[in-house]
Image (cartoon, rainbow, N blue to C red):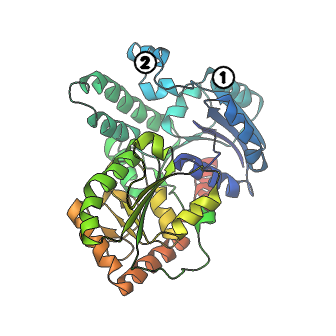
Amino acid sequence: MKILMLTPYLPYPPASGGQIRTLNLLKYLRAKNEITLIALYKNDSEKKYLPYLKPYCKEVYLCKRPEKAWQPENIFRSIFSVNPFLIVRNYSSQATSTLKELITKEKFDVIHAETFYIMPHILETDTPILLVEQTIEFKVYQHYVNSLPFFIRPLFSMDIIKLKYWERYYWRKAFLVGAVSESDRMTITGLEPSIKPVIIPNGAGEEMIVDKLEAKKLNYPVLLFVGNFFWLQNTEAARYLIDKIYPLLAKAIPSIQLVIAGQNARDKLKISDRDHIKILDIDPNNSELVKKVYAESTLFVAPIFGPGGTRLKILAAMSSGLPIVTTQTGIEGLDISNNKHVLIANTPQEFVTQIKKILSNKETYEKIRKNAFELVKEKYNWKKIAAELEIAYQRIKKA
């Protein structure tokens, strides 16, 4: 099939959840499909990554969008237009003209849009659109606004209203909507009962799946949290772990160490190394270092409370053989059971209790990580997910 795919980011390097998702889907879709990719970028330095994408696509078109989100022009256009800030800061006139030219001279079976806020680039067309929502954006934005001082929040209330309106509008405009989880699917159907989304879940990168589960020493444990710290949910989780969980945990297990790793960790967290706590910046291109950090850790701890799709970091930990202690929100949208694939905690004391529980019982430790490892290989592999996406393409083509 001939697919025209649009993404609001360059799908390389695999630094964010969206980039990881798109890159892995492209790897498997190329076998049976001819893909033309239109990807937005912010800085000219990103053009150096183009060679990494060409093997998976017939053509790749890079289109410039505003480099800095909070520049005065974006803020002004958002305040004095019907569009929310998320659409304004991700809009590229170059992408609109490129897309218009492509669909005029070439016939595609499907236009695949990753995220609703790429949709304004698509002008009137007879080509059916598959819109895949990686998360419910207005819920994520509402969480961000709630984190601001209360006297600032009213300034953003209108933008949330606009965001929700246009997100729902583009769901209706698409021929078919995809969601990454059952909970997101239910949110969409709850707001728009006529829409019946298909689920195209997230997966674990093959580079993270270990050959076998290596033995771990539990008497000198290393806790790990990994994230892209451009995202509020990740900075919140890291600070919660450092400020609320670790002080209690250090009293209970004096030998325990904590590693916080990821893109922009030091800059965004404003925290330096301290006794038994290490902050590690990781270049997303350095997959060997990423794997090394997971391999040298004992337990993955993710106190995530903000909404947002499904967590690729949870799947990465499962595939690397690390057992996980996380919140109910952390496993939202994943077919994961408490006490079978992970341990759930929702308060600092609960985290301490669950961490002590799994580190003090070798049998529980092995059971949890083995169950999680088998689940991720069976259900959350990108080859299977790409096949599910191709079924959605075929459904659109036959309609």
Q: Amino acid at mark 1?
A: Gln
As drawn, the label of residue 365 is none
Residue at disc 1, secondary structure: helix
Q: Position of residue 72 (x, y in %)?
A: 46, 15
376 horizontally vs 165: left or right: right
Looking at marks 2 and 1 on the same chain, the residue that comes earlier in the sequence is marked by 2
Residue at disc 2, secondary structure: helix
Q: Which residue is mark 2?
A: 75
Q: Position of residue 354 (x, y in %)?
A: 28, 72
Residue drawn 63% across and 24% down? 96
User: Can residue 186 be seen in the rendering of this structure?
Assistant: no
Looking at this view, is 389 or 352 the one in front?
352
Q: Position of residue 194 (x, y in %)?
A: 39, 43
Q: Amino acid at mark 2?
A: Ile
Q: How many angstroms separate mark 2 from mark 1 (CA)?
A: 20 Å
User: Can residue 18 be seen in the rendering of this structure?
Assistant: yes
To which quarter of the image does residue 121 belong? top right
Contact flag, marks 2 and 1 (Cβ < 8 Å) = no
Residue 241 in the image: above or below residue 217: above
Q: Residue furthest bottom?
A: 363
Q: Residue furthest front?
A: 275
Residue 340 in the image: above or below residue 100: below
Q: Which residue is mark 1?
A: 94
Q: Position of residue 69 (x, y in %)?
A: 49, 26
Residue drawn 57% across and 59% down? 290
Residue drawn 54% across and 80% down? 214
Number of other residues with Cα within 10 Å of mark 2, as a class: few under 14, some 14 to 19, many 20 or more:
some
Looking at this view, is 361 or 161 the one in front?
361
To which quarter of the image does residue 344 belong? bottom left
